Image (spheres, rainbow, N blue to C red):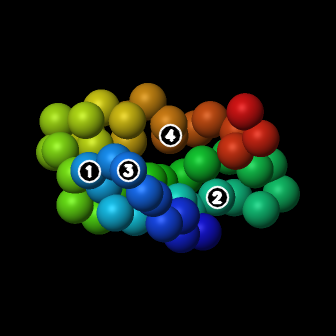
Amino acid sequence: MTYKTSGVCSTEIELDIEEESEVIRSVRFKNGCAGNAIGLTKALKKWRSSK
């Protein structure tokens, strides 16, 4: 899934979500602040996408 952002540093967020369990397998940010992207990527892994 790709989400186009607006009003923030990152221009796009790409999510790889397991269909059956809805668990986020990976997150990738296009552009934006590297420190925030690294932290959010680690925090979001294994979350359910419905949260």
Left or right, 9 with reference to 45: left
Mark 1 to mark 4: distance in Å?
21 Å
Amino acid found under the numbered disc labelled 1: Cys
Residue at 55% across / 52% down in the picture? Answer: 25
**Residue 4, above or below 41:** below
Residue 10 is left or right of residue 21, and the answer is: left
In three-dimensional space, the C-alpha distance between marks 2 and 1, rounded to whole angstroms, equals 23 Å
Give the residue pinned by disc 1.
Answer: 9
Q: Position of residue 45 (x, y in %)?
A: 50, 40
Q: Residue furthest right?
A: 20
Label 4 neighbour load within 10 Å: few <14, some 14-19, many 20+:
some
Secondary structure, mark 3, is loop
Q: Earlier in the sequence, mark 4 or mark 3?
A: 3
Circle nearer the viewer, 4 or 3: 3
Q: Nearer the viewer, residue 6 or 27?
A: 6
Q: Which numbered circle lies on residue 17?
A: 2
Work out which quarter of the rendered image holds the C terminus and state it: top right
List the residue tagged with mark 3.
7
Residue 13: tell me if it is visible: no
Picture disc at residue 45: 4
Marks 2/1 in contact by CB < 8 Å: the verdict is no
The picture places residue 20, in percent across and down from the top left corner, at 83, 57
Give the mark nearest the N terminus, 2 or 1.
Answer: 1
Give the Cα distance between marks 4 and 3. Answer: 24 Å
Judge depth for marks 1 and 3 and give the one in front: 3
Decide which of 36, 24 is in the foreground and name it.
36
Q: Which structural element holds mark 1?
A: loop
Residue 12: in sight, yes or no? yes
Within 10 Å of disc 1 (Cα), the crowding (few <14, some 14-19, many 20+) is few
